[in-house]
Image: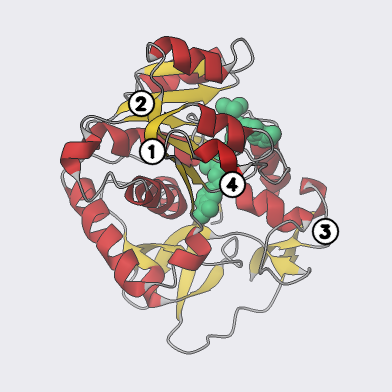
Amino acid sequence: MKALVISKLGGPEVLEIRDVPPPELAGEQKLVVGLAGGINFADLMTASGGYSGTPPPPLIAGREFSGTLPPTGDRVMGYVQWGAFAEKIAAHPDLLWPVPEEWTNEEAAAFPVNYFTAYFAYWKAGLIDDPSLANKSRVLIHAVAGGVGTAAVEIGNLLGIEMYGTSSSQEKLDRVKRLGLQHGINYKEQDYREAIKGLTHGEGVDVVFEMLGGEHTAKSVHCLRDFGRVIVYGNATGQPGTLDPRILYAKGASVHGLWLTYLSKNRELMQRAWTQLSAWISAGHLHPVVGATLPLERAAEAYRLLSDRKNFGKVTLKIS
Ligand SMILES: NC(=O)c1ccc[n+]([C@@H]2O[C@H](COP(=O)([O-])OP(=O)(O)OC[C@H]3O[C@@H](n4cnc5c(N)ncnc54)[C@H](OP(=O)(O)O)[C@@H]3O)[C@@H](O)[C@H]2O)c1
């Protein structure tokens, strides 16, 4: 079968299309015929060697996909830790979900990581279990025009949240405002801590979705108002977040971690998330944002859209 292989550790140039044997199924795994793949920031990190738990190369790339289940041909979207960007994928049935009829293969491949992560970020912030709290809450979403960011905006709309979002580009902010973001902050032109202070009349926000790392973890805490929460789930800067816990004292602030790789092993939690997400899908509320689709052969170019901050929403790959 055709697959996208990480030939050695490095940048997108290490990606190669190769003919490889189909995967061997273990335990309850099902074989899926791969049709499209969704590229995540984690795929960049896996190729460069910065992603915990992935085996060394050569390794088939990709964490999420859409495809069909033989022999019925039922359409599914799914999540794995690697091996998604291939014509055949071995996936656990608990991490396969039916594709809504009206979605394209690319939209389906753009769903699992973005929406489960965004859902869990709101859940960790306490805004899923208490809708009355959500209604009064302000959330700052970093990289608001990206994959997780656009999913967080769609879910934030449904929860009635006042959303603030950062991006490097006004054009991206204008596009994400059309999805329902109320306040866009272009961090190339304006310091986001100052912007939040101004926009919230000095009060701050209740929650920050923090995926930058480095100085931004502490800076995000400084954007909070009393009893605010920072949900930490990435370090796109490449730097580990720096934080002196003493800055949490005054406002009774807290910092929470979130890692979908780990949570995805918790059946009950994933089922609860899917029950809510699928209800929103059935009501026509969720529409995965696909900014670009490239053939598998142009995967290196597709990866660079993310590392060069040129993506809007998800970048997907056409597998067959
Ligand atoms: N913990 C988890 O379970 C989990 C799950 C999914 C994703 N994540 C994390 O969430 C973040 C977003 O992931 P994603 O796949 O949805 O990617 P993405 O947001 O679609 O793409 C990355 C975006 O981050 C912004 N960015 C800011 N600083 C950057 C930098 N130094 N280098 C590159 N991009 C930078 C860019 O947007 P602007 O130009 O608009 O700033 C870029 O487009 C990543 O940090 C990822 O690791 C974590």
> Which of disc 1 and disc 3 is earlier in sequence?
3
Mark carried by residue 79: none
Asked which quadrant contains residue 96, the reply is: bottom left
Q: Does the beta carbon of the residue at mark 3 sit less than 8 Å from ligand 1? A: no
Please tell me which residue is depicted at 37% across the width and 51% down the height of the picture: 124
Marks 2/3: CA distance?
37 Å
Which quarter of the rendering shows the N terminus? bottom right
Mark 1, residues whose alpha carbon is within 10 Å: few (<14), some, or many (≥20)? many
Instruction: Identify the residue at the far bottom of this view.
Output: 27
Give the residue pinned by disc 3: 9
> How far is mark 2 from mark 4, CA to CA?
19 Å
**Dot placed on the residue nearer the N-terminal end, 1 or 4:** 1
Q: Is mark 2 within 8 Å of ligand 1?
A: no
Q: Nearer the viewer, mark 4 or mark 3?
A: 4
Ranked by sequence position, the earlier of labels 2 and 4 is 2
Using the image as rendered, state which of residue 205 and residue 8 is in the foreground: 205
**For residue 71, what is the image quadrant?**
bottom left
Kindly identify the residue that appears in the image at 53 percent across and 85 percent down.
Answer: 25
The residue tagged 4 is: 234
Instruction: Report whether the residue tagged 1 is closer than 8 Å to ligand 1.
Output: no
Residue 305 is at least partly visible in this image: no
Amino acid type, residue under disc 1 in the picture: Ala
Q: Which mark is residue 163?
A: 2
Residue at image x 47%, y 90%? 27
SS assignment at label 1: helix
- Give whichever of discs 4 and 3 has the lower sequence position: 3
Mark 3 vs mark 1, foreground winner is: 1
* Residue position for label 1: 152
Vertical order, 187 against 266 (above or below): above
Quarter of the rendering containing residue 271 = bottom left
